[in-house]
């Protein structure tokens, strides 16, 4: 198939999922055309099956803001015709589904190119449910030729907010060859030169991720005599609050701020435990990646996380902001190496069995086929 994919290229899990999906589809022999403003971060190489089409935006004095949605729609339509795309698959509803629908409508006299929208999280739970965006998001869902969501939780949230239920759940996935333990990696010695235990948090440091809670957990764990360090991977608006709290608690000497990293598996593969204290998480891709690296996960019991992390088996779940319980759970795992390793092994087993690319990518392919066949039948 010839598949057009649009993602937010530099920020967040939806971009990762869309980019890795495209790469895997190309490995399976499909032609993938990424259409976005810059080359998606996770897309490190292009080849004869992976193409990139840059959305160019004209700057003009009259435009207070550059009309990205329209420029994207124009590029989608041009690429769809030139490359004979079978479908446009957009990740994150706002504004990508609207741009794709506009593109489809603008060329449908020549060729009908179905639109598939994948819902990832805040496009529904925050952005889409905001009154100003709600009607246009609902329109995007209704007008898409197919809609997928990354968890059962997100499907249910979409039904409740938008009264729209034609949604296929296709969860996030991991490549188990890439996300795995990295025994003997020199990075471990660099991060923990004195044999410290390593807690790791990976996110885009938005408020919704509650990264400051990780600092509280580290302080509590150290107060109980555990020689632990915290590795903070990523960057974003809450980073200064994290540093400030680290300073107040005298913890910054034990926190490694490593910024955005191209390969987070390097860090997860050498750590001891993963912290994800988010107040909202439609799936929690980072928790899945951590489990694939045999890290027990300390997380919140919200959104789609309980679909990914099995409480008491692959990690421990707590109420949002209950840092005391999260600290106790962290301590319990750090104090009992057999327990920690057992959780890690089960987490990997669950990640590979339920969420490997070999299990999930074929679900996308069958969904594509279903949608394309349905629109061919409708236009015949
Ligand atoms: O909604 C966001 O926070 C952004 C979004 C993204 O585009 O990065 O993240 C969501 O998508 C991920 C991939 O499907 C999910 O694993 C994350 O749980 C989800 N984030 C939230 O729901 C907060």
Image (cartoon, helix red, strand yellow):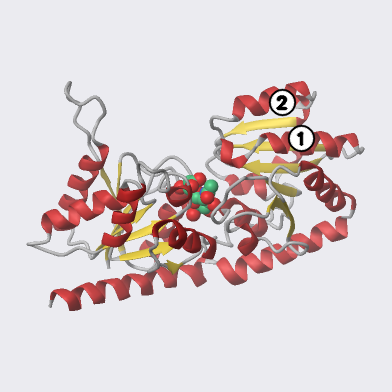
Position in image of residue 315 (x %, y %): 74, 57
**As drawn, 40 above or below 143:** above
Left or right of 155? Residue 289 is right
Q: In the figure, residue 28 lies in which quadrant?
A: bottom left
Q: Give the residue at x 19% y 75%.
A: 376
Whether 207 is drawn above or below 94: the answer is: above
Q: Is residue 192 visible?
A: no
Residue 377 vs residue 203: left or right?
left
Distance from the alpha carbon under mark 1 to that under mark 2? 8 Å
Is residue 142 at all visible to an observer of this figure? yes
Query: Which residue is at 30% across, 55% downward?
Result: 140
On screen, 73 above or below 176?
above
Q: Position of residue 266 (x, y in %)?
A: 63, 46
Q: How many residues crowd around disc 2 within 10 Å: few (fewer than 14), some, or many (20 or more)? A: some
Asked if 138 appears above or below 245 in the picture, the reply is: below
In the rendered image, residue 118, in percent from the top left (x then y), is placed at 39, 58
State left or right for residue 372 relative to residue 189: left
Disc 1 residue crowd, few under 14, some 14–19, many 20+, Cα 10 Å:
many
- In what element is the residue under mark 1? helix
Residue that protrudes farthest toward the right in the picture: 225
SS type, badge 2 = helix
Label 2 beta carbon within 8 A of ligand 1: no
Q: Residue 161 or 229: which is nearer the viewer?
A: 161
* Nearer to us in this view, 364 or 167: 167
Q: Which mark is residue 245?
A: 2
Where residue 77 appears, as percent x and y from the top left, is 17, 52
Q: Which residue is mark 1?
A: 216
Q: At x 44% / y 59%, what residue is drawn?
A: 158
Mark 1 and mark 2 lie on one chain; the one further toward the N terminus is 1
Label 1–label 2 contact, CB within 8 A: yes
Q: Residue at 71% of width from left, 50% of height from top?
A: 319
């Amino acid at each position: 198939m010839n598949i057009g994919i649009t993602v937010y290229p530099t920020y967040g899990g939806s971009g990762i999922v869309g980019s890795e999906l495209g790469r895997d589809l190309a490995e399976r022999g499909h032609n993938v055309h990424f259409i976005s403003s810059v080359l998606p971060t996770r897309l490190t190489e292009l080849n004869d099956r992976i193409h990139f089409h840059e959305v160019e935006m004209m700057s003009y004095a009259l435009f207070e803001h550059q009309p990205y949605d329209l420029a994207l729609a124009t590029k989608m339509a041009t690429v769809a015709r030139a490359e004979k795309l079978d479908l446009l698959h957009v990740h994150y509803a706002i504004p990508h589904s609207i741009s794709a629908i506009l593109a489809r409508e603008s060329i449908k006299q020549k060729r009908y190119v179905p639109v598939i929208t994948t819902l990832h999280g805040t496009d529904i739970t925050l952005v889409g449910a905001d009154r100003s965006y709600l009607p246009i998001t609902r329109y995007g869902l209704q007008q898409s030729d197919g809609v997928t969501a990354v968890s059962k939780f997100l499907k249910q949230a979409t039904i409740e907010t938008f009264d729209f239920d034609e949604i296929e759940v296709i969860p996030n996935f991991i490549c188990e060859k890439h996300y795995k333990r990295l025994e003997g990696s020199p990075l471990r010695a660099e991060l923990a030169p004195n044999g410290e235990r390593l807690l790791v948090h990976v996110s885009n440091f938005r408020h919704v991720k509650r990264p400051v809670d990780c600092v509280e957990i580290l302080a509590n764990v150290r107060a109980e005599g555990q020689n632990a360090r915290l590795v903070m991977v990523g960057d974003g608006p809450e980073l200064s609050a994290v540093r400030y709290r680290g300073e107040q608690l005298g913890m910054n000497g034990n926190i490694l701020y490593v910024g955005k990293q191209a390969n987070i598996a390097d860090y997860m593969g050498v750590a001891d435990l993963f912290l994800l204290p988010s107040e909202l998480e439609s799936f929690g891709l980072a928790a899945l990646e951590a489990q694939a690296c045999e890290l027990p996960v300390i997380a919140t019991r919200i959104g789609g996380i309980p679909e990914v992390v099995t409480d008491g088996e692959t990690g421990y779940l707590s109420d949002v902001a209950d840092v005391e319980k999260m600290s106790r759970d962290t301590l319990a795992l750090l104090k009992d190496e057999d327990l920690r390793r057992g959780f890690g092994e089960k987490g990997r087993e669950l990640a590979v069995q339920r969420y490997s690319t070999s299990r999930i990518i074929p679900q996308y392919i069958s969904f594509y086929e279903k949608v394309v066949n349905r629109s061919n039948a409708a236009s015949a």
